[in-house]
Amino acid sequence: MVALPQTVSPTIAAIEAAVAAAEPRDFDAVIRASSIGHPCERHLWYRFRWAHAPERFDGRKLRLFHTGHAEEARMIAWLRMAGVDVQAVDPATGEQWEVVACDGHLKGHLDGISTGILEAPVTPHLLECKTHNQKSFDQLKRHGVAVAKPEHVAQMQIYMHLAGLSRAFYLAKHKDSDELYAERIHYDMAAALALVAKAERIRAADTAPPRISDDPEFYQCRWCPSQGVCHGGQAALRNCRTCLQSTPAPYGTWHCARHNRTLYADNQRAGCPNHLYLPSLVPGEQIDIDEVAETVTYRMPDGSTWVDGAPL
């Protein structure tokens, strides 16, 4: 018997398309505290500077994210059933707990603050809930969160530091079996301060930090969303954040020196005709600057010259 060709259900395809359309990806307005543990500072700088388009996810991947958010609520409910007091929102605002640093350019949101964790009932704990697949959960149980998921530990250290907490409770769930894993994390001031300093370097830098590797096939570079700009000679996007005349300003805003004005999100996306790239975003050697014409000339790898700021 000849096997029938496998077809994709048009209804499922419509679901995936609808989910993707309902949640378009946008640039990160700030450095995310949940990402500050990423090992490549250059990648974080590209994201902060909007050098490339935001990473796109299909409907299936977005649904996985939604499942993670839904599981977080279930895990909080289980803790409450066990007698743990979990404050999932800041009573002062009625919104999710938020922490802020670096003049408003580093932000993060806590899953909650819990009291009554049975291992230390009196001590308030940062609550961090995560879901894991089989491989990730096995590594977590075998090695602990510091080895298996160092970015999660960095996230918790930043949160504890900015929220004034000394302990974190990491609650993980196996996506398939519902098995739970828990670990208490102690606040490490030196580690937290180093992470805040890292975020401040990214905020203040007008030059791309060093690559984590000069090999584009390095495992952390090969599938990186910044790979094209970082290793492939891809042109950076043209917007206010890639312009050498704009800088991060207090309260999470940006300032344009060319027009002497504050830049808000819509301004930053639009850019202006006077845009000049940050030199480290141009894959060429800077050879001339004309202050009157407001142009910068580069010699490109193929020997040609390119004038940034020249009329298009």
Image: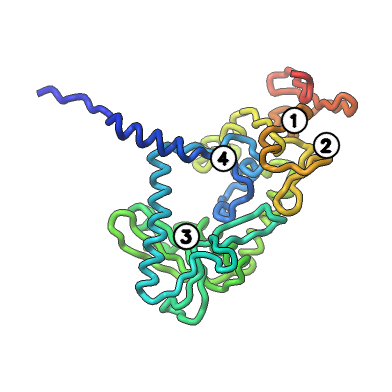
**In terms of sequence position, does the residue under pointer 1 or pointer 3 come before the other?**
3
Residue under the image location 43 percent in, 78 percent down: 119
CB under 8 Å between callouts 1 and 2?
yes
Where is residue 200 drawn, in percent x and y? 70, 54
Report how many numbered discs are placed on residues in the image: 4
Q: Which residue position is annotated with label 4?
A: 26
Residue under the image location 52 percent in, 64 percent down: 89
Disc 1 packing (10 Å; few <14; some 14–19; many ≥20): some
Q: Which residue position is annotated with label 3?
A: 147
Residue under the image location 53 percent in, 62 percent down: 110
Per the image, label 4 sits on a secondary structure element best described as loop
**In terms of sequence position, does the residue under pointer 4 or pointer 3 come before the other?**
4
Q: Is residue 113 above or below residue 199?
A: below
Scheme by which the image is coloured: rainbow
The reply to whether residue 234 is visible in this rendering is yes
Name the amino acid, label 1: Cys
Where is residue 287 drawn, in percent x and y? 82, 26
